[in-house]
Image: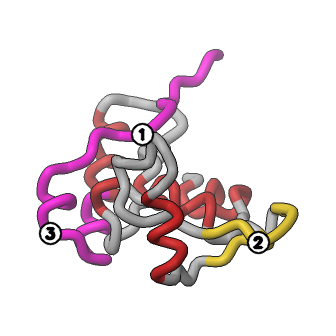
Amino acid sequence: MIKTTVVGSYPMLDWLAVSPSQQALEDATMVVLKTQELADIDVLADGELYRFDINHPETNGMIEYFVRPLGNVRREITRSDIEAFGKQKGMGFRVRPAAVIEGAVNEGTLDLVNAYRRIKP
């Protein structure tokens, strides 16, 4: 039997983007899971909402989710980092970098296995 699932990001819920909070994120996740359950999807997924960063709702947290746990990546952004970032071509869509690379990037604490287990039925 072939099971059904979804792939990719669920569309951003307007009310989550307008009023981001931890509770709103949990509520949005339950809506996404219940929607799939009602559609008889076999393998539920949270539509990548676990990556949502309530401090950066404009990017849905995608960049920060993957970048911040990586090894040799600095999350603290200085004024000079912001200035150097602004001088790079093609970066006009963001005001500041998500992080600064300080050496050879490694997996650090990024743990996609446990991210999967968090919503596995």
Mark carried by residue 102: 2
* Image location (x, y in percent) of residue 90: 45, 41
C-alpha gap between disc 2 and disc 3: 34 Å
Residue 39 or residue 106, whichever sits in front: 106
Question: Which disc is residue 37 wearing?
Answer: none
Q: Amino acid at mark 3?
A: Ser
Distance between the alpha carbons at the discs numbered 1 and 3? 19 Å
**Mark 3 lies on residue:** 19
Q: Nearer the viewer, mark 2 or mark 3?
A: 2
Figure quadrant of residue 1: top right
Residue at x 63% of width, y 69% of height: 100
Return the x and y of residue 61 as percentages of the image width and height: 43, 59
* Image coords of residue 92 (percent x, y): 36, 48
Residue type at mark 2?
Glu
Residue at 22% x, 70% y: name it: 20
Q: CA distance from mark 1 to mark 2?
A: 30 Å
N-terminal label among 1 and 3: 1
Q: Secondary structure at mark 3?
A: loop
Quadrant position of residue 3 = top right
Precedes in sequence: disc 1 or disc 2: 1
For image coordinates 81% across by 61% down, the residue present is: 105
Tag 2–tag 3 contact (CB < 8 Å): no
Q: Nearer the viewer, residue 43 or 13?
A: 13
Identify the secondary structure beneath mark 2: strand
Q: Which residues are magenta?
A: 1-28
Residue corresponding to mark 1: 9
Give the amino acid at mark 1. Ser
Dividing the picture into quarters, in which one does residue 103 lie?
A: bottom right
Q: Are marks 1 and 3 in contact (CB under 8 Å)?
A: no
Is residue 92 rendered to the left or right of residue 45? Answer: left
Q: Closer to the camera: disc 1 or disc 2?
A: 2
Q: Is residue 70 left or right of residue 10?
A: right
